Image (spheres, rainbow, N blue to C red):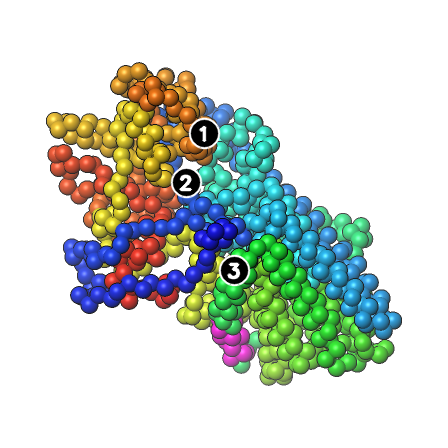
Amino acid sequence: MDEDGNLQISNSNYNGEEEEEGDPENNTLNQPLLKRHRTLSSTPLALVGAKVSHIESLDYEINENDLFKHDWRSRSKTQVFQYIFLKWTLACLVGLFTGLIATLINLAVENIAGYKLLAVGYYIGQDRFWTGLMIFTGANLGLTLVATVLVVYFAPTAAGPGIPEIKAYLNGIDTPNMFGFTTMMVKIVGSIGAVAAGLDLGKEGPLVHIGSCIASLLGQGGPDNHRIKWRWLRYFNNDRDRRDLITCGSASGVCAAFRSPVGGVLFALEEVATWWRSALLWRTFFSTAVVVVVLRAFIEICNSGKCGLFGSGGLIMFDVSHVEVRYHAADIFPVTLIGVFGGILGSLYNHLLHKVLRLYNLINQKGKIHKVLLSLGVSLFTSVCLYGLPFLAECKPCNPSIDEMCPTNGRSGNFKQFNCPNGYYNDLATLLLTTNDDAVRNIFSSNTPNEFGMVSLWIFFGLYCILGLITFGIATPSGLFLPIILMGSAYGRMLGTAMGSYTNIDQGLYAVLGAASLMAGSMRMTVSLCVIFLELTNNLLLLPITMFVLLIAKTVGDSFNLSIYEIILHLKGLPFLEANPEPWMRNLTVGELNDAKPPVVTLNGVEKVANIVDVLRNTTHNAFPVLDGTDQTTGTELHGLILRAHLVKVLKKRWFLNEKRRTEEWEVREKFTPVELAEREDNFDDVAITSSEMQLYVDLHPLTNTTPYTVVQSMSVAKALVLFRSVGLRHLLVVPKIQASGMSPVIGILTRQDLRAYNILQAFPHLDKHKSGKLR
């Protein structure tokens, strides 16, 4: 990190010296791999949004101390019912508010962009093209400026889609300020400004983030400074229940973006959630069902003309149920080709975007004004291209047999007149001088084989490939779904046009398949994408070929690089734990890994205040093993694990003893409540201890988690990683294989950072030449 607080993102190159003494892949667990060059270390800094933050892990593990056990035993059936009822109530509220905010965003975008395009169309109709360009460019720059200034100066965490940070949170990483009230408001206003400005980005990713913010705020009772101190909300004052709510929020966001309830649930399951269970599936589905009801009611109101310029647009809904889908054996080749193209282009897009994001990081490090200027520069380039490129297209005569008005200079429509004479339309202006949603709707249009020329489709495809690379990464809320859909639909329709009479599939459906293939090639999702497109098109006959295309595109893309969200996670430095361990991890034991770490710091069951203060002051550890019976006769017992936050609470509340003794169960309940212990408060700097208090004692037994997860030192790192990730741990104790007299019952603690492949290779560089393609 440089002196201005900007994170220096660098290539993950592992330049350790190569060892020639045997192949680690062929070693057994009995042959230690302790040829390390340095200690196991990590940097707990990462980019959250566009802000450098100190990263901590979340406590998804149940802390089974004496207070928790008493609270659990004393809960009545009424309290259990309250807890279950509140879970479902919050799930309903998450869906309700997400649907309402999605409605607000759609209304605002369609009306702001609509009036802008009407004003531009008015001057174009009078052949005052320069005036139209000035209005178009000026309005877009103003909207972009509002979105960028809000993000840069008020909520840096609102930049980007927010989906990588949500994935990290649900993986067990605390992402500071990511779900705050200010972030949510800036995300809403910024998304309206950026999308209405015609930038090549969508509101789908931001809606996922907004839904997660709503869930987090509801679970904690409101913003940090104005929380509702409702007694029932104490049940949700923990990381586990907040994780479930944010999962519901992310699914609701996808549902609100695509009007796809089942697709939203599957998106949460396939893409963002690390931990899942059947009860969570039901509540997530309930949230998305509420979103659909809200959107359906909103559409009914708008159909009566009460939403201003919001007409049939605004929500990406492409109903092709009336299209007769026919495909035969001869169509296998073009459909396969679409899948292969999607995988290749998706992986190429990920590779190039990775390079662009590194370049933007260098620019953003120069200061806030450079972030604003970068966004304005992209907006200016986008506006000039969208307005100027249609002049390169040839005018096409209107088909008198169609029912739709042709030509038109209105806000939407498939036949924009632009610079053409009466009776002719500009096909490229139809795709460019409109909102992104209408552009997708136009290029997805069915039964229009001759509407768009091949030259116009090539220009459209090339432009959006460039805009898709340079727009994502600027300091505005932005989503990747729509840019990828625009690119994919263009080459899909081009292939359909090239096939001509050799295929039975409509060109609009080729565009749908192209969009699906590029999304699978870039994002590497299959099941959720298939259902989303199925719910969008409302045509079950598309299911077989959509599945076929998605599988091919994902397979091809996986052979080149990671998915786009995984690349962004690595760029930001978020310590995300992958589901599958590296093969060489099976030949490394946790005992060997622990030897590369500093010695573990332990505390006694009844500890002196001075020792606790010294440990808190001189270490940054977030948990400490608590040991009992340190004499030679009885041996040493591992009582459990105590969190740093609980030690800080003990010191702040002055829960001290004049003599070295164990307390009674009622004594701790007089001083602490389970709700207090669930709060993440660990600011030791606010604690002032006098010299006389330093000589007093603290009984740590009642606050210690007596059932921490432990692994024996001979266990492989691969197995430990699977356990750590599956259970959602923050700390994993390593115990010796042989318990000898006078030997400590715990030899170390493993955390998330210790189990990351990159950090392990820093301590064991001889494994460098065997790292997998994913690490490369």
Please provide the residue range marked out in magenta. Answer: 331-344
The local crowd at label 3, few if under 14, some if 14 to 19, many if 20 or more residues have their Cα within 10 Å, is many
Real-space CA distance between mark 2 and mark 3, rounded to the nearest whole angstrom: 32 Å
Q: Is residue 514 left or right of residue 446?
A: left
Amino acid type of the residue that numbered disc 3 sits on in the rendered structure: Asn
State the residue position of label 1: 686
Image quadrant holding the C terminus, namely bottom left
Which of discs 2 and 3 lies nearer the camera? The answer is 3
Q: Is residue 292 left or right of residue 400?
A: left
Real-space CA distance between mark 1 and mark 2, rounded to the nearest whole angstrom: 26 Å
Secondary structure character of the magenta stretch overall: helix
Furthest residue to the front? Answer: 3
Furthest residue to the right? Answer: 126
* Residue nearest the observer in this picture, 245 or 24: 24
Q: Position of residue 641 (x, y in %)?
A: 31, 34
Q: Position of residue 508 (x, y in %)?
A: 65, 72
Q: Secondary structure at mark 3?
A: helix
The local crowd at label 2, few if under 14, some if 14 to 19, many if 20 or more residues have their Cα within 10 Å, is some
State the residue position of label 2: 60
Name which quarter of the figure residue 109 lies in: bottom right
Amino acid type of the residue that numbered disc 1 sits on in the rendered structure: Asp
The local crowd at label 1, few if under 14, some if 14 to 19, many if 20 or more residues have their Cα within 10 Å, is few
- Does 334 lie within the magenta span? yes
Name which quarter of the figure residue 664 lies in: top left
The residue under the point 27% across, 31% down is 603
The residue under the point 66% across, 61% down is 376
